[in-house]
Image (spheres, rainbow, N blue to C red):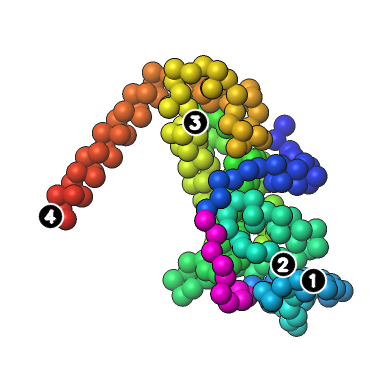
Amino acid sequence: MWHLSYEKETRVLLSVKMVSQQQTKDSGSKKLGMVAPQDKSSKEMKSSKKMKFASSSAETEPTSQTTISDDSKSTGRGMSTMPRVVKRKLQKLRPIVEYNKMGKGIGQAHIEMQSYIGVLARSRVPLVDKKWSQIPKDVKEQIWEAVDMAFVVGQGGKKSVLASAAKKWKDFKSTLTRHYILPYTNDKEKLSHPPKTYKFIEKAQWDAFVASRLSQDFESVHSQHAQIREKLEYNHRLSRK
């Protein structure tokens, strides 16, 4: 029921339209570790932006290195990253995610992995009024397998990937609620179709999600949370005086 073929995944990734942030020019080259088969060959030299690759038959013990160029102008977020991720998956190239001494992910590979997790969380997890713990295990497993196929995750592994997916899924539902539902409670026509920005949302799921967000139960919970946030902000302002 929840299974998506690789071809469908590619179509979903390429159909998602993300709200892009302002992009800045990269004044220096950003290096990224990659794992690739020994017989890999690449002749992409379209820009001066280089990335480091580790060529090895083993995922965790690279034996040699080579570099190829990345012809992307900027990583950005969302769909500006996804075409490269899909391309590398087809080429069996896996960026190696790096971590600092505190165990926090750093570098370009970590940024791209987080963007990829976000796309998967939005497009693969059903848009339902449930908690993450209630989402079927096979859906979570598909997300992990997709990320593991695209990146060498390293420390944190599956647990950290799924924790990130859970937060991004929750944030996505919050964004839809605040920007595409609550402002249009009196506009039934506006609420009758999923936002054009997120064409991958099925209408049946959208209708059910809208209904749950307009219910009295949700309105009560939302009001309570708003009061709590207001109180916290007020206390924060007092503490700064």
In x, y percent, where is residue 6? 78, 46
Q: Which residue is mark 3?
A: 180
Question: From the viewer's perspective, is 121 left or right of 103?
Answer: right
Cα–Cα span, label 2 and label 4 = 50 Å
Q: Is residue 224 magenta?
A: no
Q: Residue furthest right?
A: 39
In x, y percent, where is residue 206? 58, 26
Residue closest to the eye, 131 or 173: 173
**Among the two numbered marks 3 and 4 on one chain, the one whose residue lies closer to the N terminus:** 3
Cα–Cα span, label 3 and label 4 = 36 Å
Residue under the point 26% across and 33% down: 227
**Amino acid type assigned to the residue bearing label 1 in the image:** Glu
Q: Is residue 30 magenta?
A: yes
Residue 187 shows in the view: yes
Q: SS class of the residue under badge 4?
A: loop
Residue under the point 43% across and 27% down: 183
Please rate how many residues cluster around mark 2, counting C-alpha atoms within 10 Å: few if below 14, some from 14 to 19, many from 20.
some
Please rate how many residues cluster around mark 3, counting C-alpha atoms within 10 Å: few if below 14, some from 14 to 19, many from 20.
some
Cα–Cα span, label 2 and label 1 = 8 Å
Q: Which residue is mark 1?
A: 44
Q: Residue furthest bottom?
A: 64
Q: Which residue is mark 2?
A: 71
Q: Which residue is mark 4?
A: 241
Residue closest to the eye, 185 or 162: 185
Principal secondary structure, stretch drawn in magenta: loop
Quadrant, the N terminus: top right
In x, y percent, where is residue 172? 51, 40
**Amino acid type assigned to the residue bearing label 3 in the image:** Tyr
Residue closest to the eye, 202 or 129: 202
